Amino acid sequence: MIRHFFLLLLLVLVSVSALETVSALDYIRFVHQGKEQNEEGRITLESSKEFGFESREGQFYVFMTDPPENIRGRRNIIDIKNLLDRKSDDVSFEYYTKAEMLERLQEEFPPSEGYHLMDVPPFIVVYTTSRAFANWHSNLLKKLYNDYLSYWRRQSMQLTEPEFPLVAIMLSNDERFRRYAQQEGVNLFQEQRAYYHKLSNRIVMYDVTGQQAFREGEQRRQNPNDARRFLAQPENIKTVVHEAVHLVGFNVGMHPRNAPNPVWLYEGLAVLHEVPDTRNSSAGWTLGQPHVNRPRLDQLRRFVGRQHMESPILKMLQDDKSFSNPATALDNYALAWGITYYLVKKKPKELVAYLKILQAKTAESDDSGEIRIRDFESCFGTDWDTFDKGFLDYIHSRL
């Protein structure tokens, strides 16, 4: 969940790509990672040195002059010198249909290399795992999607259906997972099991159950031991659900994917929903009312016990950097969970009002620490002493 590259890529994306309604369909041809690639889509706002592009598949590309070394070569960051051709016509932009998406993915992930496709609306699952693993996780993703929309719509959030199928990639083992991440330019930490790539708009995971012992692509029926093996390690469910919450949230209108989003909020919602329910033997997870995230709570209590600053919340609200620093990330994920859980339980109407403010932002919206504080205070008040006291009392005495 510590994704250093997301923060920088988001800043790059927001700086060049305010999405606008356009009539033309744009075509680009470029070379990336040694391969020629063609994409249809729409050009977004551009500067003299760079431009953004949204493909009909829903991926974002950023074409830059001399990309910084630390992001050069990543899948969706293209050196503008590698742009071979760019043209437009008067055909209206439309996202790919499901049939077109399936055809595109079949080309990208050919059966000859052990890939299979599964249509599980609103997802298209690409997998090299056993069919049992792919089935179980597809059902988990579908349940999460339905429960997520149902829960937040009950809280009066206006959410939409995705405009195109959502892609989930399930790989057979850690080696293949890390090789794919390397091709995307994703820096994984040692025990990372899944990730959501904000520009490619895909969730990627691998089989941690031991099913990789089976031949890749083997077709067999799921048996009860498959679920037990997965449920025996609740961390497996937490990671998959956490990353899937990002995929769903950024595609149903909870968080505009091309707008400035405070990291604490979308990470707070992910850790809010990630808690496994091991009593549910069929799914291992259920949303309902969010459960207390015990590991995050324990981490949070240790963290706030070490603090001597006036407000541990205020700094995180203004600055996303603490999430990309390995020395502070775990504490801040715990703090993000704690604030989100507290607001869900004690200030639900104010939280929904705050979410709607952020939901209305676009890539052209200004973003700064002062603006973030103003947005927060417009819903929760300006008395930080009272807010902090209520929050800290809740996490120490009420949970």
Image (cartoon, grey):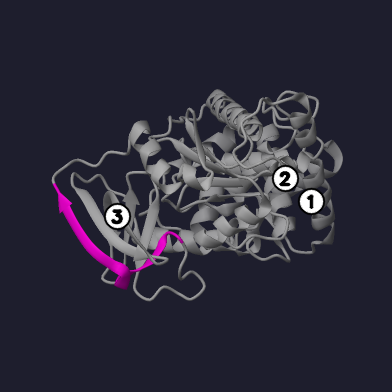
Q: Residue at x 70, y 26 (%)?
A: 283
Would you identify the image quadrant in which residue 53 lies?
bottom left
Question: Viewer-proximal residue, 304 or 121?
Answer: 121
The amino acid at mark 1 is Leu
Q: CA distance from mark 2 to mark 1?
A: 7 Å
Q: Secondary structure at mark 3?
A: strand
Question: Viewer-proximal residue, 164 or 294?
Answer: 164
Marks 2,1: beta carbons within 8 A: yes
Q: Secondary structure at mark 1?
A: helix
Which residue is identified by label 2? 338
Does the stretch in magenta take in 81? yes
For marks 1 and 3, the one nearer the N-term is: 3
Q: Is residue 278 in sight in this rendering?
A: yes
What percent of the width, then of the height, locates residue 247? Answer: 53, 42
Does the stretch in magenta take in 187? no
What percent of the width, then of the height, locates residue 227? Answer: 75, 30
Question: Viewer-proximal residue, 112 or 107?
Answer: 112
Q: Where does the C terminus fall, quadrant-wise?
A: top right
Q: Residue at x 58, y 37 (%)?
A: 351
The amino acid at mark 2 is Gly
Q: CA distance from mark 2 to mark 3?
A: 45 Å
- Residue 246's tag is none
Q: Residue at x 86, y 40 (%)?
A: 397
Q: Which residues are magenta?
A: 75-89
